[in-house]
């Protein structure tokens, strides 16, 4: 049973437009959510996170929204740039988990010039 | 800033051989993790450590052992490699159990033939 799901394996957007990446989770014990970005042949890098006590967190061009009732979060990138082309992983953690994170399968974002 | 360093970067093993993957971090982080990533999938937790001298099993621990004799190092061992262990292995560390995300290494690509 996959507890964190990213249902879209890929997404293609035009440069300057908004990119919206989605993530669903099933475990109600998760209370901290993170997004990572991964380029080929590199390790993932932390992008942005949100605690379950918030419904929005913003950092520059990146905003994460959390809908706890729907067990859904999304990452918005505005405006999208070609350098944003990468695999984006959603991850979830619980405060009793010793920091362990459960990852989704990732969404490959392609931003076209 | 070295961050998290993994060695080796690539390795080919024959079935039944053993090897050790080394992860070293210079950020004084308490928490360290070993994940594996298979094609088209997210990262799955193998083992983790919440401090020097401690280790615990993750989601997919079978066939692996770990040790954390020094705070900065986390070793992942394969005693008898199997083709099913062909994967990319990522080590990660974090300062806090909950906040701030992981710092990942660049990965070790292991092929077992």
Image: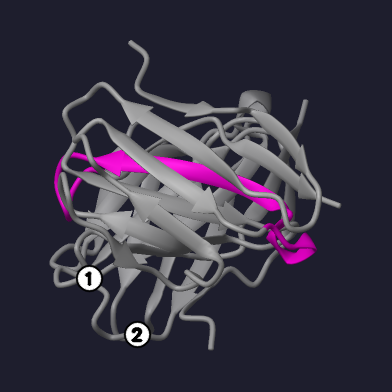
SS category of the residue bearing label 1 = loop
The quarter of the picture where residue A51 lies is: bottom left
Q: Quadrant of the N terminus of chain B?
A: top left
In-front residue for pair A68/A31: A31
- Residue B111, given in percent of the width and then of the height, sits at 78, 46
| Res. A74 visible in picture | no
Magenta span includes A29: no
| Res. B68 visible in picture | yes
Which region of the structure is painted magenta? B81-100
Residue lying farthest right?
B113
- Residue A109, given in percent of the width and then of the height, sits at 68, 45
Subunit ID for the residue under disc 2: A
- Residue B60, given in percent of the width and then of the height, sits at 51, 71
Contact between marks 1 and 2 (CB within 8 A): the answer is yes
Left or right of residue B88: residue B29: left
| For marks 1 and 2 on the same chain, the one whose residue lies earlier in the sequence | 2
């Amino acid at each position: 049973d996959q507890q964190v799901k990213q249902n879209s394996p890929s997404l293609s957007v035009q440069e300057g437009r908004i990119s919206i990446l989605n993530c669903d989770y099933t475990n109600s014990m998760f209370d901290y959510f993170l997004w990572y970005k991964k380029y080929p042949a590199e390790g993932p890098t932390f992008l942005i996170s949100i605690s379950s006590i918030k419904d929005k967190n913003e950092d520059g061009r990146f905003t994460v929204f959390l809908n706890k009732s729907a067990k859904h979060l999304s990452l918005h990138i505005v405006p999208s740039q070609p350098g944003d082309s990468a695999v984006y992983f959603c991850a979830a953690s619980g405060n009793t988990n010793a920091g362990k994170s459960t990852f989704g399968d990732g969404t490959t974002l392609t931003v076209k010039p | 800033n070295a961050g998290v360093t993994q060695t080796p970067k690539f390795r080919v093993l024959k079935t039944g051989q053993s090897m050790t993957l080394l992860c070293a971090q210079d950020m004084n982080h308490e928490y360290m993790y070993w994940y594996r990533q298979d094609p088209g999938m997210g990262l799955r937790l193998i083992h983790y450590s919440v401090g020097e001298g401690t280790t615990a099993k993750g989601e997919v621990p079978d066939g692996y052992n770990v040790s954390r004799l020094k705070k900065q190092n986390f070793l992942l061992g394969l005693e008898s490699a199997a083709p099913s262990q062909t994967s990319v292995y990522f080590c990660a560390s974090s300062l806090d159990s909950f906040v701030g995300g992981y710092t990942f290494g660049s990965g070790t690509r292991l092929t077992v033939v």
